[in-house]
Every structure is written in C-alpha cells, then in structure tokens.
Amino acid sequence: MTISQTNANWYIYGAGGLGIEVADIIRSSSRAANQEFNLVFIDDFSTEKMIYGLNVVRLEDISGEPAIATVASGEPQVRLSLRNRLVNTRLKLASVSDSTARVSPSTMIAEGVIISPFCSISSRAKIDINSTINTMTIIGHDVTIGEDCSISSMVNLGGTVKVGARTYVGMGALIKEGVQIGDDVIIGMGSVVYSDIPSGMIALGNPARVARKNENKQVFK
Ligand SMILES: CC(C)(COP(=O)(O)OP(=O)(O)OC[C@H]1O[C@@H](n2cnc3c(N)ncnc32)[C@H](O)[C@@H]1OP(=O)(O)O)[C@@H](O)C(=O)NCCC(=O)NCCS
C-alpha cells in the first residue's frame, strides 16, 4: 500500500468481477496493516449506484482531496486505457497485495499492481506498472513482467521468464524457465510454453504454438 491515512478514499476503477475481488484484497491487506479505507468503485458506464455494498461514481464526478486508485480489469488494453484516464486527475495509482500472498522482499512491484490471494512472488522478480496477478499464481525468481499485463490464476512462470507489456497469460498456463514472451501477446489457458513467443501473437496448446496474430487485442469477447 502506498498511503497510510485511515478512512481515506481508495477508488477501484472497474466494478466487474475483478473489481469486487480487488475490494476483498484491499480489505484483507488493510485489515492486516490495521488500516481502513473507504472503498469506492469508479465505473463510467454502470447505471447502478451501489455494487457489492460500495458506492459507484464516474471518474468525471470525483473531486476533493487527492486519493488513490487501482485499476480492476483483466483485459490488458482496458487496463492501459483506464490507467491513462487517471493521468492528470487527483488519483494516484496504488498497488495492493493480498495478506495471504508471499512476496519476496527483493521483489520490485510498481504502482497499480494487484497481487491476489495465495500468490508466490519469488526473489528479484519485477512487476511493472498496473499489472495484475491473479489467484494462486507462482512467479519464479528474476521474472520480469511488463506494464498493464494480466496474469490469470494458477499460472506458473519459471525463473527468469520475461513477459512483455500488455500481455495476457490465461488460466493455468506454464511457462518454462528463461522463456521470453513479447508485448501484446495472448497465451491461451492451459498452454505449456517451452519457447519464446514474439510480440503481437496468440499462442496456444501444449507445446504452445503461435495460432495467429493478436489483431483485435481483446481476450474476452
Ligand atoms: C486463447 C483464447 C483467447 C482464444 O479465444 P478465441 O479466439 O475465442 O478462440 P476460440 O475459443 O474461438 O477457439 C479457437 C480454436 O482454438 C482452440 N483453443 C482455444 N483456446 C485454446 C487453448 N487455450 N488451448 C488449446 N486450444 C484452444 C479452440 O478449441 C478452437 O479450436 P477449433 O477451431 O478446432 O474449434 C481463449 O481460448 C483463452 O484461452 N482465453 C483465456 C481464458 C482465461 O484465462 N480465462 C480466465 C478468466 S478469469
């Protein structure tokens, strides 16, 4: 967490499935640190005023004291665009790590990163701005993950793996140690990746093969 005020507003940008999970993660981690935040969803399209017991506002309606915000979308392009919408606002990106996650003290975690329950982030790993790591994912030593990535649940990244910016790694994928995955890649769920995957591709299967270009850069249809 990057702010120590109690009862400060913590905005969660995106009130969908990941949004409610992030609300739980913030509550769990702030409880463990004896802090309390007033959680608020930002959703620029929802007509609902309250979701999961939290108020829902539009970004343009936020005024007042500076506060912190975490982007909650599993779609890398959406993560990037919501992060960009926060630039020049009163909201500063904040990272959050569930109290059950095991994060090495030598890990570097940038602003806006989400670390979900039961993840293990090993020594000297680097997770860049605004990436999200879902439940029970294992990140090996010296792994680097670029900006605005979405790493699904139960993924295992072997030591020194590199993942480029805005890449999506599907549920349960295994990436062999040392493999490099480019920018704007989608790795299909359950894939086993033994060799490098160039930027801008969708790769699937065991062994993972490039299936096609990632033309519309959208994981969820
Ligand atoms: C990779 C992915 C994005 C492809 O989606 P898509 O473009 O809609 O592809 P389709 O589902 O139309 O499948 C196209 C073909 O690839 C196959 N395929 C799709 N995903 C596959 C995968 N992960 N492994 C192996 N084959 C796969 C399909 O069976 C289909 O084969 P067919 O042409 O012989 O019928 C999607 O399958 C995926 O893995 N999404 C991530 C899911 C996930 O992690 N969810 C987490 C939710 S929190």
Image (spheres, rainbow, N blue to C red):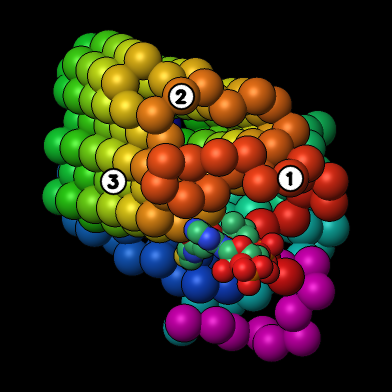
For disc 2, the marked residue is 195
Which is nearer the N-term, disc 2 or disc 1?
Answer: 2
Three-letter code, disc 1: Arg
Magenta segment: does it hold 220? no
Q: Quadrant of residue 42?
A: bottom right
Q: Identify which residue is drawn at 36% across, 33% down.
A: 175
Which contiguous range is marked in magenta?
39-52
Q: Position of residue 32 (x, y in %)?
A: 15, 49
Q: CA distance from mark 2 to mark 1?
A: 16 Å
Determine whether, in the image, residue 109 is placed left or right of residue 82: left
The answer to whether mark 2 is within 8 Å of ligand 1 is no
Q: Residue at x 55, y 82 (%)?
A: 51
The amino acid on which the numbered mark 3 sits, given as a three-letter code, is: Thr
Q: Is residue 55 visible?
A: yes
Q: Quadrant of the N terminus?
A: top left
User: With 216 as the anchor, is 2 left or right in this view?
Assistant: left
Q: CA distance from mark 2 to mark 3?
A: 20 Å
The circle drawn on residue 212 is 1
Q: Name which quarter of the figure residue 140 lies in.
A: top left
